[in-house]
Image (tube, rainbow, N blue to C red):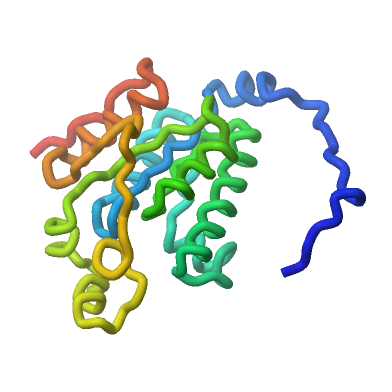
């Protein structure tokens, strides 16, 4: 990997302030960092929240673990070191998007406390909200939409979080959501509330 040469790098400031971007978009930029086991419901929540925010006229975007690995991070694996680099890159992207005034919804297993703390420091405390999608391993494994847990149990999938690699649950997240207990609408409402308590709740769909 090429190393940067600090003496050749100069930070260029913008003529546009963060407050100007905020006023233009009419929203406060924030990153919701959704962490949890595979099949816990992170992506489902992220895209439902994105839909609700867009319906309210809010500029937002989902950074999803699988999607990011198709492009930006397609050159890294799943070792602890690679996972750390994956999260670092995503956090830097989220910071840039927040600087543009956008709401970012990051849905990543991000199993290690150290890596999530690094993301917190990169993005900044003012814009970072940690959400633990706390659905239990038993429930996630029973869902297993991609068949990954089955492969991990069979020993054909290495470094799989919850089976052959640990998951370190957040100790004090801004919010915990168990998708086996809360409905999708209830969960989205909770997410909306930690972005802005003044946002309207997600409309309940008729049964």
- Work out whether 156 lies above or below 198: below
Q: Is residue 177 left or right of residue 139?
A: right
**What residue do we see at 46% from left, 64% from top?**
80
**What residue do we see at 20% from left, 33% from top?**
186
**What residue do we see at 58% from left, 26% from top?**
25
**What residue do we see at 17% from left, 51% from top?**
136
Residue 190, x across and y down, in percent: 27, 29
**Which quadrant of the rendered structure holds the N terminus?**
bottom right
In the image shown, does 185 or 43 lie closer to the viewer?
43
- Work out whether 77 lies above or below 184: below
Residue 103, x across and y down, in percent: 50, 35
Residue 7, x across and y down, in percent: 91, 49
**Which quadrant of the rendered structure holds the C terminus?**
top left
- Work out whether 146 lies above or below 55: below
Task: Tell me the quarter of the picture where residue 147 sits.
Answer: bottom left
In the image shown, does 77 or 44 lie closer to the viewer?
77
In the image shown, does 95 or 156 lie closer to the viewer?
156
Q: Is residue 204 left or right of residue 23?
A: left
Residue 24, x across and y down, in percent: 63, 23
Residue furthest right as drawn? 8
Figure label count: 0
Task: Tell me the quarter of the picture where residue 71 sits.
Answer: bottom right
Residue furthest left as drawn? 207
């Amino acid at each position: 990997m090429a190393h940067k040469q600090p003496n050749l790098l100069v930070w260029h400031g913008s003529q546009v302030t963060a407050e100007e971007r905020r006023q233009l978009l009419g929203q406060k930029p924030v990153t919701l960092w959704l962490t949890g086991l595979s099949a816990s419901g992170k992506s489902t929540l992220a895209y439902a929240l994105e839909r609700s925010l867009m319906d309210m006229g809010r500029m937002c975007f989902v950074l999803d673990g699988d999607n990011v690995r198709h492009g930006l991070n397609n050159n890294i694996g799943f070792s602890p070191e690679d996972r750390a680099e994956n999260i670092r890159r995503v956090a830097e992207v989220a910071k840039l998007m927040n600087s543009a005034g956008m709401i970012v919804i990051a849905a990543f297993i991000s199993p290690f406390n150290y890596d999530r703390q690094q993301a917190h420091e990169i993005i900044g405390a003012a814009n970072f909200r940690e959400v633990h999608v706390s659905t239990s391993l038993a429930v996630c494994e029973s869902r297993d939409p991609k068949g990954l847990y089955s492969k991990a149990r069979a020993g054909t999938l290495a470094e799989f979080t919850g089976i052959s690699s640990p998951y370190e649950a957040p100790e004090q997240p801004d919010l915990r959501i168990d998708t086996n207990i809360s409905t999708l609408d209830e969960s989205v409402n909770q997410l909306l509330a930690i972005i802005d308590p003044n946002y309207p709740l997600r409309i309940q769909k008729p049964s």
